[in-house]
Amino acid sequence: MIAFKNATILSGEDLEPISGWIIVENRKIKEVGEGKCPKKGATDLKRGIVFPSFTNAHTHIGDTIAQDLGIYEPIKKRVGPEGMKFSVLKKNNQRLIGGMKSSINELLNCGTTAFCDFREGGIKGVLKLKSLIKKDIESVILGRPNGGDIQSLLDVCHGIGLSSVADYSPNELKTIKNLVKKKGKILGIHVAEVEDDVKSALKMNPNFMVHLTNTNDENLELIHELKIPVIICPRANAILGAGVPKIKELIDKNLVGLGTDNVMVNSLNMFREIEFAFKISRGLTKDPTISGKSILKLATLNGRKILGLSSNAIEEGKEANFIIVGRRKYLYDPIVAILHRYETGDIRGIVKGDQFLNCK
């Protein structure tokens, strides 16, 4: 049993701040309450903030070994099918494994307890990543067809993560769509990162789309009508010079998650991602009413819903899966503070089931 008292807790699916306590038993949140904690010996958090752990809903950690390679080159030359990224991945087997291991550690250190990786390299690529996964972090691995047996690839991963529908023939796309559906797996697709290919991607009936950086309002409305979830990666899009997604329009109408994308172009730090998303969405729209709560949900609760993982909302009966940060003085709004005043160095601990990780 683990118990905490004297905390500001962002509770439930609505991240409602309460001042109170939490008791964890047998991996689940047994009780959450306001006021004085009934459990003797509970750890005093001294008004620290407790909130659901991060889910990084879109990563490519295989390219950890090529950080900032080609920073001034066009996006297609850097991460396109024949780009710099893949030249590096083909040549550096052992370094690639070390890089992925490093990135998994970084994810945990940043308060991320679940991630979804679009893993290149076919079956071998998927198996390399699976061999490195720690028990403290949940992974959804979407393999990429590499000219091999798609059915065998689906047998070793959670589904398929396509670079773009433009990278495959009509017959290949038909096969992928049918096999994913037959096996009950996940299909995620990069869509409109550079060119607007929304209508072609919709024909694949994906479980979710990634990016939507460059599309029009008509297509956004179509995605909304079809209730297709979206994962955005605004920092990566920005550093690649691809633009920035219409964050406000997306979160007003869709279930939206947040990811950091390629480690080659962007860090895995979700604190930085939520800060950028919060500020750029308000700046581009000149709308100061965009709520901090809606942005924090992108990085905590929403990603797990999109990926089919159990909820990590802080409420009784749910599996314990939350971050503890120390209290800062003079804060009016704990949610906004998390978005742009806290950093990874402020994490005092991560609770995952019965484990208390990264304590400071």
Image: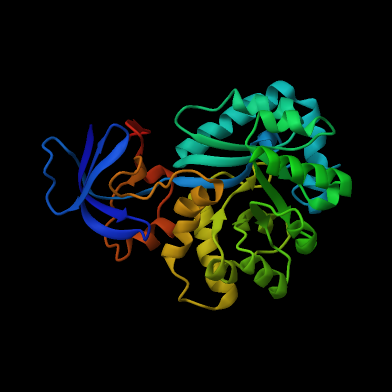
Q: Is residue 67 visible?
A: no
Q: Is residue 197 rendered to the left or right of residue 136?
A: right
Residue at the spot 80% in from the left edge and 26% down from the top edge: 91
Q: Position of residue 60 (x, y in %)?
A: 66, 40
Residue 244, image quadrant: bottom right
Q: Position of residue 164 (x, y in %)?
A: 78, 50
Q: Is residue 84 above or below residue 244?
A: above
Q: Is residue 23 rendered to the left or right of residue 209?
A: left
Residue at the spot 60% in from the left edge and 73% down from the top edge: 284
Q: Position of residue 340 (x, y in %)?
A: 44, 59
Residue at the spot 58% in from the left edge and 27% down from the top edge: 101
Q: Is residue 355 visible?
A: yes
Residue placed farthest to the bottom in the image?
A: 286
Quadrant (top left/top right/bottom left/bottom right) for the C terminus: top left
Q: Position of residue 158 (x, y in %)?
A: 62, 36
Quadrant (top left/top right/bottom left/bottom right) for the N terminus: top left
| In the foreground, 12 or 21 | 12
Residue at the spot 29% in from the left edge and 66% down from the top edge: 332
Q: Is residue 269 above or below residue 131?
A: below
